[in-house]
Each structure stands twice: as C-alpha cells, then as structure tokens.
Amino acid sequence: MIKSIKLLSLFVILFSLILTSCASTKLTGSWKDEQYTGTVKKVLIIGMSKKPTVKRLFEMEFDRQFKARGIDAVSGFRVLPPEFKPDKAVLLSTVKELNVNAVLITRVMDKKTVDRHYPRGVYVSYPGYYNDMHDFYGRSYQYVAAPSYSYEQDVVYLETNVYDAVTEKMIWAALSKTFPRGAVKKEISTFVEIMMKKMAADKILE
C-alpha cells in the first residue's frame, strides 16, 4: 500500500510537470497601430542577441515561417555586417536596397531565474476494483497526500516589433516570455509560430 501511494505521488508530480511544460512560450501583451491598413509584403528580419548562433536561429526561423505563408523575407545576418549594431544609416540603406516594406526586430529584454512552487495536494487513491457497495464505501476514505515541491526555472522575456519601412513607424508589437525546457531551435520555432499567428490574427499578414 505504501509503495502504491509513493508511485501515485510520483505520478502526480510528473503529470504536473508535463502540464506546465506544454506551453513554453506565452504571449503577455500586444499592440497594433489601428491606422495601419497595409500588410507585410517583404520583410527584413533582425534578431538582437549577443550570441551569433541564437541570432541566426531567430532570423532563419522567422524567414522560414514567413516564406511558408508566401511572404518574402530576408534574414539580417545575410545582408548586415556580423558586428552590426543599431545604426540607423546602415539600416535605412539596407532597407532601401532590399526594397522591403517592413522590418521585424526581436530582442531579449531580460532573463531571470525564478522559483516555481506547487503546493501540497490531496488525491483519491482508487483501489484496483471493488465488488459491492460496502467495498466502495469502506475504501472511499483512502486518500493520498501528494507532497509539495518547487524548482528553479529560467524565463526569458522577449520583445518583437514590426516597423513600416517607409514611415519608419512601429505598426505592431508583442511581449512574450519563454520558459526554456528543450533544444534552443525547437523553443525558437515555437516562439516564432506564436508570433506569426498573432500577426495574422491582427491582420498585418495576409
């Protein structure tokens, strides 16, 4: 009986972890310029990261998902110098040369390690079977107290903005937070998918 209780407690903990890992990226806020009536036709994608590999992954995944929707896209690392810093003259020159009508910039705003705590809970431990009403009534008071637990979790806060290449004005923005749990490439793919769906919902993508 003790062994079964321990196994159930372990199952409860594992199940809770699985549930919390289903959505590694959450959209926390968004904005759209309601006066903007156009859509993104060709976009320059810029990932702002101190890690060149991460920058490329962001840009390449946005590039891939834009093109999957039939929208022309250019990854920043292909047309901007490797040591590129926010330089308006260089950016405007590149935008003009590429003839894009939008610029998407994603940057990491902050990264923290937070404590996540799951309180103690009580769960019913059902027996394998019961033959009659007395069996059911007698065993109905078998409960399992699952232990509380906590663990540290990294969280990355990101900001994604889209600018009109002609007016240079922001037309769309989103804030999000990601709890990295797997391979970086997979996490980025999920993040980009969420951003793309939101842009489409806000009708800046066709």
Image (spheres, rainbow, N blue to C red):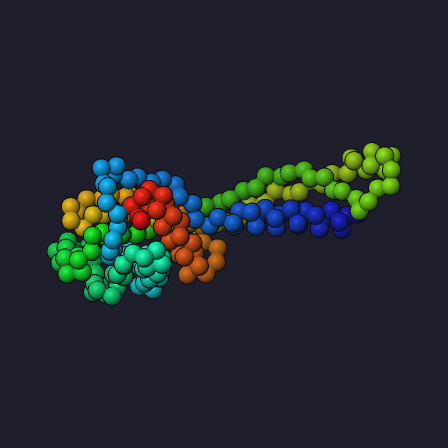
Q: Is residue 153 left or right of residue 131?
A: left
Is the residue 71 above or below the residue 35 in the image? below
Is the residue 13 above or below the residue 44 in the image? above
Q: Answer yes or no: is residue 155 visible.
A: no
187 or 31: nearer the viewer? 31
The percent coordinates of residue 80 (x first, y second) are 21, 63
Q: Is residue 45 left or right of residue 136?
A: left
The structure residue drawn at horizontal position 87% and vertical position 34%, both measured from the top left corner, is: 134
Q: Answer yes or no: is residue 188 visible.
A: yes
- Residue 85 sits in which quadrant? bottom left
149 or 182: nearer the viewer? 182
Is the residue 76 above or below the residue 113 in the image? below
The percent coordinates of residue 32 (x first, y second) are 28, 40
155 or 25: nearer the viewer? 25
The percent coordinates of residue 203 (x first, y second) are 31, 43
The structure residue drawn at horizontal position 66% and vertical position 49%, both measured from the top left corner, is: 11
Q: Is residue 109 left or right of residue 124?
A: left
- Residue 46 sits in which quadrant? bottom left
